[in-house]
Amino acid sequence: MYLYMNGEMVREEEARISPFDHGFLYGMGLFETFRVYEGHPFLLVDHLERLNSSLEMIGIRKSLNKDEVIQVLKLLLKKNRLTNAYIRLNVSAGVGAVGLPVEPYEHANVMMFVKPLPEAGGPTEKEAQFLKLSRNTPEGPLRLKSHHYMNNLLAKKEIENRTDVEGIFLTEDGWIAEGIVSNIFWVIDNQLFTPDLGTGILNGITRSFIKELASKKGIQVKEGFYKTDVLNTATEVFVTNSIQEIVAISKVDSLVFPGVKGELFRMLHQAYQMYTNSLWSRKEIN
């Protein structure tokens, strides 16, 4: 496979970064993962807005615009002969002296790589379990999609290599937070609930899209701080991320849910599929 790195297309086995890149030394790097459907980068504008805002927040002087990313993406897809793909767009701080600088980073490393994906299929479901490991608090005022992933990696060890299970974090205070690689939603009395950003979760792009989509469908969305017993009265549960889309949950620990048979899940999943080949931002939902 070929990847893009700082203006060049290189074979993945030939890609190199310096050991003095602060993205490696200190975790000063950010990334976005998104999905391409038949050549269309779904919600690309939303991903770039989050990335650019986060880069400014941590002092990496780099901003990526839609046109340049599309140009690179087209070349990358063509080079790898793909039309449906997983994309990771990564920006690291770049080379710096050993130590903790306070000045902005001026020479970021930009990388984009792809993995093939099949065409989008029908609805899918998993089981879920609450993790013993607590969700760590964000490194700054809010959680960024950064290189700091040890908490997620350690959590993944709890569920081992099972691909049919998602682990759900709780905060140290016992609030429902998010999945290892997802945001979580549930349904009570035909209303949609999801944890508040104040729990320290990532403001997922698909999370925001689902909230907007549900609102357009006349479904009230509530965000707050919830303990695990709230699921005792829930009628549906699902999780979201940009690659897996919406995944129905059939079981959380001992609680059983309808999974892909859930009415609200099915409606949202069907609506989601209508937009994947055309939408640039959730703001375009009509």
Image: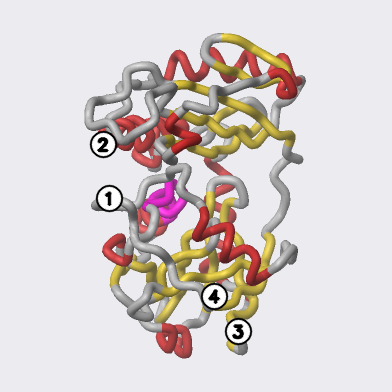
Could you say whether the residue bearing mark 3 is in a helix, strand or loop? loop
In the picture of the structure, the residue carrying the numbered disc 2 is 57
Mark-to-mark CA distance, 2 and 4: 30 Å
Q: Amino acid at mark 1?
A: Gly
Residue 8: % across, % down: 59, 10
Name the quadrant of the N terminus.
top right
Residue 33: % across, % down: 54, 39
CB under 8 Å between discs 2 and 1:
yes
Q: Dot 4, crowdedness within 10 Å: few (<14), some or many (≥20)?
A: some
Q: Amino acid at mark 3?
A: Asp
| Nearer to us in this view, 111 or 258 | 111
Q: Amino acid at mark 2?
A: Met
Q: Is residue 78 left or right of residue 184?
A: right
Q: Is residue 222 visible?
A: yes
Q: Which stretch did the figure color magenta?
A: 203-210
Q: Which mark is residue 131?
A: 4
Of callouts 2 and 3, the N-terminal one: 2
Number of callouts? 4
Residue 150: % across, % down: 52, 55
Q: Is residue 87 above or below residue 215?
A: above
Q: Which mark is residue 253?
A: 3
Q: Residue at x 61, y 67 (%)?
A: 166
Q: Residue at x 58, y 54 (%)?
A: 270
Residue lying furthest top: 8
Of callouts 2 and 4, the N-terminal one: 2
Could you say whether the residue bearing mark 1 is in a helix, strand or loop? loop
In the picture of the structure, the residue carrying the numbered disc 1 is 140
Q: Which mark is residue 233?
A: none
| Nearer to us in this view, 108 or 246 | 108
